[in-house]
Amino acid sequence: MRKFELEAISGIPLVHNDYQGVFPLLVHRAITGLVSGRILHLYSGTSLIGDVRIDIEHPNATLNCDVEDFVKDDIRVWDFVILDPPYQITRTDVKLNSYGIKGAISANVDRRRLIKEYLQKHTENVLWLDQCAPMIKGFYREKLWLVLSGGFHTVRVLSWLKREMKPLL
Ligand SMILES: C[S@@+](CC[C@H](N)C(=O)[O-])C[C@H]1O[C@@H](n2cnc3c(N)ncnc32)[C@H](O)[C@@H]1O
């Protein structure tokens, strides 16, 4: 396996409010310090990072729609795609029942495949925050941030995946 950088960071939230899913401060800093160019943010929630922000319901998004529908139609190419998909099967799940969405995206093989195929065609870099550290064919791990929220909270991982160089002909 190719070597990659690994950093452990604290999971203290960016702001203390009722919204559970907000990026931790150091995750927010890691992302904003890195991204440039054309930026797409999927499952963007409260975040204002990215020119195009897709969330099924949050008013801070530039487009309210299901990510699944968005990736089926979008043909643009991005420098960075950021994703913080839902992984908690508690309140988010209840909240999203009316859309027929249940559980973590990373545990849903069909949704996961759809998103991976979109990323393979449409971006140079992926920043994916989840309870797993996904790998996508055609990309390699540049860096992982281990996000430790403390107490008995779940550990999350921010993965920076970069597209493999195309072979020189
Ligand atoms: C973990 S939160 C992201 C929070 C964000 N990182 C922030 O700083 O606020 C996940 C978001 O995904 C949205 N969401 C869940 N399922 C979705 C779907 N199928 N399509 C689009 N957005 C979805 C939820 O509304 C929620 O805002």
Image (cartoon, helix red, strand yellow):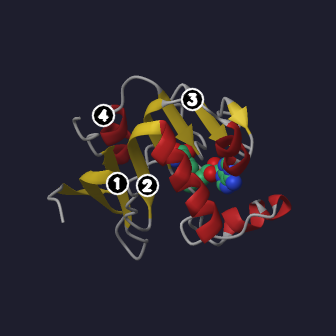
Mark-to-mark CA distance, 2 and 3: 22 Å
Residue corresponding to mark 2:
129
Q: Residue at x 57, y 62 (%)?
A: 112
State whether residue 122 is above or below residue 138: above
Amino acid type of the residue tagged 1 in the rendering: Ser
Q: Position of residue 56 (x, y in %)?
A: 72, 46
Label 3 CA crowd tier, 10 Å (few <14, some 14–19, many 20+): few
| Viewer-nearest of discs 4 and 3 | 3
Camera-nearest residue between 39 and 76: 76
Q: Secondary structure at mark 3?
A: loop
- Mark 2, ligand 1, within 8 Å: the answer is yes
Contact (CB < 8 A) between labels 2 and 3?
Answer: no
Is label 2 in contact with label 1 (beta carbons under 8 Å)? yes
Residue visible at 69% across and 45% down in the picture = 72
**What numbered label is drawn on residue 34?**
4
Residue 151: image location, x then y, percent: 37, 73
- Contact flag, marks 3 and 1 (Cβ < 8 Å): no
Mark nearer the N terminus (2 vs 1): 2
Coordinates of residue 48 in the picture (x, y in percent): 53, 31
Toward the bottom, the furthest residue is 152
Q: CA distance from mark 4 to mark 3?
A: 21 Å
Residue 159 is labelled as 1
Instruction: State left or right for residue 135 relative to residue 72.
Output: left
The residue carrying mark 3 is: 76
- Which quadrant holds the C terminus? top left
Q: Callout 2: 10 Å neighbours few (<14), some, many (20+)?
A: many
The amino acid marked with disc number 2 is: Leu
- Tell me the crowding category of disc 4: few under 14, some 14 to 19, or many 20 or more residues within 10 angstroms, Cα based: few
